[in-house]
Amino acid sequence: MMRQAQALRSPMDRGAMAEARTLSVRSARAMWMGLLAVALLLAQAISARALPESFADLAEKISPAVVNITTSTTVTAGTGPSPIVPEGSPFEDFFREFQDRNGGDGGEPRPRRSQALGSGFVISEDGYIVTNNHVIENADEIQIEFFDGDVIDAELVGTDPKTDIALLKVEADQPLPFVSFGDSDTARVGDWVVAMGNPLGQGFSVSAGIVSARNRALSGTYDDYIQTDAAINRGNSGGPLFNTDGEVIGVNTAILSPNGGSIGIGFSMASNVVNRVVGQLQQYGETRRGWLGVRIQDVTPDMAEAMGLEEASGAMVTDVPEGPAMDAGMESGDVITVFDGVEVEDTRALVRQVGNTEVGKTVRVTVWRNGDTETLRVTLGRRETSEGTMPEAELQDETQPQVLDLMGMSLSELTPDLRQQLDLGQDIDGLVVTDVDEMAEAYEKGVRAGDLITDAGQQKISTVAELEEQISVAEEAGRKSILLLIRRQGDPRFVALPLSED
């Protein structure tokens, strides 16, 4: 009876199971459809983030804080070069009359007013305005035009020609709309950016583009430019470069162009540099950068091999004049590998880091010296008051020199005549390069007649014998090249030359 009952129930069980499977399939399908819908919504959100339909809301938000800048400068007519007109030419009388009208007749030149246009942006409700130094340089009067049409005279607070940044101040009757600096280090290549300014006098003009590149260096010591293809033209200088959150991540400064107009290669000084400069200008009216007191150069792979360094990184010290580094015991030939806890990639990175460090701060500096590391404690000075300090040169007598032909160079010990010709002081010793074989690697690496070799293998040398001794030491250590410190007109640099020419 039990078997029969089971047999009678089996078809019903099978039907129930089939229905259950159908419900399961429907549930799974519904779940996947839901997930697909969520994915589509996320894709749309990402697409909207990457390709905004409009920058109108952003432009409306930032426009009140962007300003047009007009500067006026008094210039003297007749001080520039005069046109060359052949005597007896039919144009002679015309140019003479023109010069007479402008004070070019031998009397006092007549002054005239010259105007220039630029851009800027307000960074505080009490009226501080950032722009480029070249926008307001030598200006007698600076006028600020705001988005609502108001025009106010501005006073110059301070400038920093090294980063081409200037800080202005206006006195307004009410709090001003302003924008804040963002973190330029978070900007990525491909991010959307918006530039705003006064291009070619067409005030409050907005253009959009992307971050084309980061960490561009043009010509300055502290350059850190963001490259963008957002349209930047003459008159945009000093204007802001915004991210999509309305934060300033750069100050539009320069363009690369064969015709003076935008071709999609513009440069904005990174906000992290500008923000630091502006803070010092607000507090002191000038910049105050840290100063280590060394001359440096990048470490090349062959130099690294000659010194036993694993990587071609750090900053090679070529000279140590009187200053903080000398007081701390730093020496020419040291390779600075760590500064204040941060690894040093190259000279540019070190210069920026030192400059950004507080004046008077004592920092730990790790150097590679003679195959080992040493840590020095250096109290930084101030660059603005210390640049250009170098020891004075004096003359001394020398004995007859020895001459050596080595590594494609003809070398001579110093003589009184050579000291006088090269303007070398008595505290400087070395070997003079009297000739260089143009087929030698020394010539390829820039060594020329008149150069002075002061160090070999990071040891001071003054005689041919001392150079030969350092070459022997390098060969015994299995080195393929030797590191030479070469000075040209007082400017030092290191060069690694092979111990034997192939």
Image (cartoon, grey):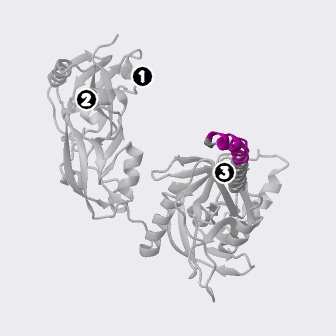
Badge 1: residue crowd in 10 Å (few <14, some 14–19, many ≥20) = few
**Where 129 falls versus 162 (above or below)?**
below
Work out whether mark 1 precedes mark 2 in sequence or the reverse, and give the earlier one: 2
> Badges 3 and 1: C-beta atoms under 8 Å apart?
no
Disc 1 marks a residue whose amino acid type is Glu
The disc label shown at residue 210, or none: 3
> Where does the C terminus fall, quadrant-wise?
top left
Residue in front for this viewpoint, 84 or 475: 475
Distance Cα–Cα, label 3 vs label 1: 41 Å
Q: Is residue 206 above or below residue 406?
A: below
What residue is pinned by disc 1? 444
Q: Is residue 31 left or right of residue 387?
A: right
- Percent of width and height locating residue 385: 34, 62
The numbered mark, 3 or 1, whose residue comes first in the sequence reads 3
Q: Which residues are magenta?
A: 3-22
- Asked if residue 450 can be seen in this view, the reply is no
Which residue is the site of mark 2? 308
Residue 99 at what x, y percent from top left?
74, 60
The residues bearing labels 3 and 2 have C-alpha atoms spaced at a distance of 43 Å
Residue 87, labelled with which disc?
none
